[in-house]
Image (spheres, rainbow, N blue to C red):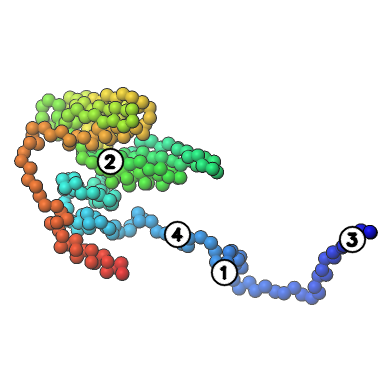
Amino acid sequence: MADETFTTEAPAAPTGDAPQVEESGPLRERRGFGGKPKGRGPPRRRRDDDGEEWVPVTKLGRLVKAGKIESLEHVFLHSLAMKEAEIVDHFLPELEDEVMKIMPVQKQTTAGQRTRFKAFIAVGDKNGHIGLGVKTSSEVANAIKGAITLAKLSVVPVRRGYWGSRAGLPHTVANKLQGKCGSVRVRLIPAPRGTGLVAAPATKKMLFLAGVKDCYTSSRGHTRTMGNFIKAIFSAMKKSYGFLSPDLWTKTEFLSSPYSEHADFLARSAKTTVAKTA
């Protein structure tokens, strides 16, 4: 049986002028069904845009913005949970942040290794307040931004005291403190005025942000693990108000919670918020 050969000839070019395409507007390429471009739509506005007014969403936030709570110590006194970083910004506008460490972390997946960045940020006002935040993200900027927010939410008071004479302002920790994280143990010891901060660089930064000027320190364990080292320092400083010295043995007067004291205001503000949302 003889082989058959099939040949395909190209179609002849049409005669005459080519059809004109109107240039009244840009040509749109069809992407997906319906010709609509894919994606999530326009970029969403972030809550922390410059110039955007803070709209509190919690009871504590509404009380703070209305001026019903005068200081951050009033929040600590009643052990009220802070869930908005703007509350700390309202009471501590001079808060400063310090990048303690940024490290890459990896996770093994079926597609390979996924690398993310972990940021440790410490915040303080150099006047008895310190906070520490840890955040992991795929980008360094987002990790730092999230860690700053978490550090503000974890702000705690640091009690300062004297070594020897009580002349002048408090300059050192009030008593010996110890904190731990993992294998790291950190100890803070009061020091005479003028001693300075006898500590590692990371410890110096955190004590400086807390407003402690003179302090001896002692550490043991694997302090090279900077994350655990920083957490151990923060754990020790959080315990500064856990020990009551004789000058704090005064009779405790129990006050009503701000939530119960301003219950009527919270009810009205909640209705106003619901009405604006609707």
Mark 2 Cα shell of 10 Å, populated few (<14), some (14-19), many (≥20): many
Which mark is drawn over residue 5?
3
Q: Which residue is mark 2?
A: 131
> Foreground residue, 167 or 79?
79
Residue 182 x %, y %:
33, 30
Q: Nearer the viewer, mark 1 or mark 3?
A: 3
Q: Quadrant of residue 99?
A: top left
Sequence-wise, which precedes: disc 1 or disc 4? 1
Callout 4 touching callout 3 (CB < 8 Å): no
Whether residue 194 appears in this view of the structure is no
Q: Please name the residue shown 23% across and 63% down the image.
A: 270
Q: Nearer the viewer, mark 3 or mark 2?
A: 3
Per the model, the C-alpha gap separating discs 4 and 3 is: 59 Å
Q: Nearer the viewer, mark 2 or mark 1?
A: 1
Sequence-wise, which precedes: disc 4 or disc 2? 4
- The secondary element bearing badge 4 is classed as loop
Mark 3 Cα shell of 10 Å, populated few (<14), some (14-19), many (≥20): few
For the image, the number of numbered tags is 4
Sequence-wise, which precedes: disc 1 or disc 3? 3
Q: Quadrant of the N terminus?
A: bottom right
Amino acid carrying label 3: it is: Thr
> Foreground residue, 90 or 112?
112
Per the model, the C-alpha gap separating discs 1 and 4 is: 22 Å
Whether residue 195 appears in this view of the structure is yes
Q: Which residue is mark 1?
A: 34
Mark 4 Cα shell of 10 Å, populated few (<14), some (14-19), many (≥20): few
